[in-house]
Image: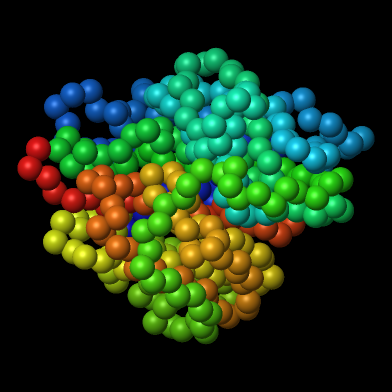
Amino acid sequence: MKKRIKLLCMICVLIISMAGCGTYIIEDDNSNAPPVSQENPFKEKEDGSLATLRHGESNPNRDENQNVLPYEYNGGEFSLEYYFRTEGKLDNVGFLLFLDGEPQAYKVNSTDTEYEYCHYFETVDGKEETVTFLFTPHTGKKGDTLNLTVVSITNPKFQPDMKETSSYGWYHKHLERMLKLHFNEDSIDNDSIYPAVENIFSNVSIGEEKVTSDYLENELGKDGWGNVSMDSLDNAIYSTLLYDGKLVYDNVNVTDKNTLTVRYTLCGMPGVDYKISFFLNHNPVAFEDTLSYDVTLHKGNVWMVEATIDTSKLGALNTFYVAAVASSDIYDIGVNKRESILIYKETNE
């Protein structure tokens, strides 16, 4: 439990530091290191860290106080120059874009490339790389100013194979950068330009309930949040994610299951607006006709999203996680991404 709390505290410190371009130092106490015969992909460096990651906007317009000004959307495809730099054991990095808290498909470097929700980039130790994100906004009206959130995923290509590795260890951690996009023109309402999304849910329900002492002790407490009181709920963001009613940190075997029920809860700081999205293999999962649910946190309440996964629609190995991204103007609350979990089926190979 202490190791779980240590991880969450590290993420909270990361979130607080996001006033400018973020730097993520990935550390490891080897608690999740898999028993492998080859070189351990989770092996730490001599200084105790695995790697560092920094990313942010390139050459933005700033005000007299050096604050980054909102970007301007003038119709068509929007272009954002962006950089990233890694040092240490990071083979690749991926980026997810969110506009107003909802997943946004984008292209890289050329209008002739394909729209994808997550693009992967190979990294070179100590070298800064610059790329251009291009996208046609899926939402936004003239006069709006919306959050544009860039979320990195460390080593997104890594996936446990249930032979040499069974968990994600310190991979798939996230670091976000929140910018603003002001609309001088309406966005183009054309869903046909975006790639297909995952359709694995057979049933979804969402609701809001009062926080109970049982929830504080048996869900938040067992999930590693420590001693959470009704008062402390007002000062932070908390979440849980259960698989068939159980807390999971590594993998779920669905070989003999027709369905898998996932239950995500979110509570905390009153007045914060979030959009909740589920991801399978770094692609958003559809909730009927939408990619995310709108949630406004209320004092003393908890939001719950329960979804039933049709396992016949899954492959042998599946990376699954949930992300709650702020759509309000509060910058210091960060992105609430749950740890990646492997949902797998046993094979004869």
| Relative horizontal placement of residue 120, taking residue 159 as reference (left or right) | right
Residue in the picture at 64% in, 70% down: 296
Q: Residue furthest right?
A: 64
Q: Percent position (x, y) of residue 25? A: 49, 34
**Which x, y percent locates residue 269?**
63, 68
Q: Is residue 48 left or right of residue 195?
A: left
Identify the image quadrant of residue 80: top right
Residue 71, image quadrant: top right
Residue under the point 89% across and 36% down: 63
Is there any visible trace of residue 31 in the rendered image?
A: no
Q: Residue at x 65, y 49 (%)?
A: 190
Vertical arrangement, residue 42 with respect to residue 101, above or below: above
> Which residue is drawn at the image coordinates 75% and 53% (left, top)?
140
> Residue reaching furthest left?
348
The one of 327 and 113 positioned closer to us in this rendering: 113
Image vertical order of residue 199 relative to residue 30, above or below: below
Does residue 140 lie above or below 220 as drawn? above
Q: In terms of depth relative to the viewer, which is nearer, 115 or 20?
A: 115
Between 142 and 130, which is closer to the camera in this rendering? 142
Task: Residue 177: name its quadrant.
Answer: top right
Quadrant where the C terminus is found in the figure: top left
Residue 265 at x, y percent in the picture: 46, 69
222 with respect to 282 (left or right): left
Q: Quadrant of the N terminus?
A: bottom left
Can residue 128 be seen from the camera position used here?
yes
Could you say where residue 247 lies in the image, as x and y percent from the top left?
Answer: 30, 64
Chosen colour scheme: rainbow
The number of callouts visible is: 0
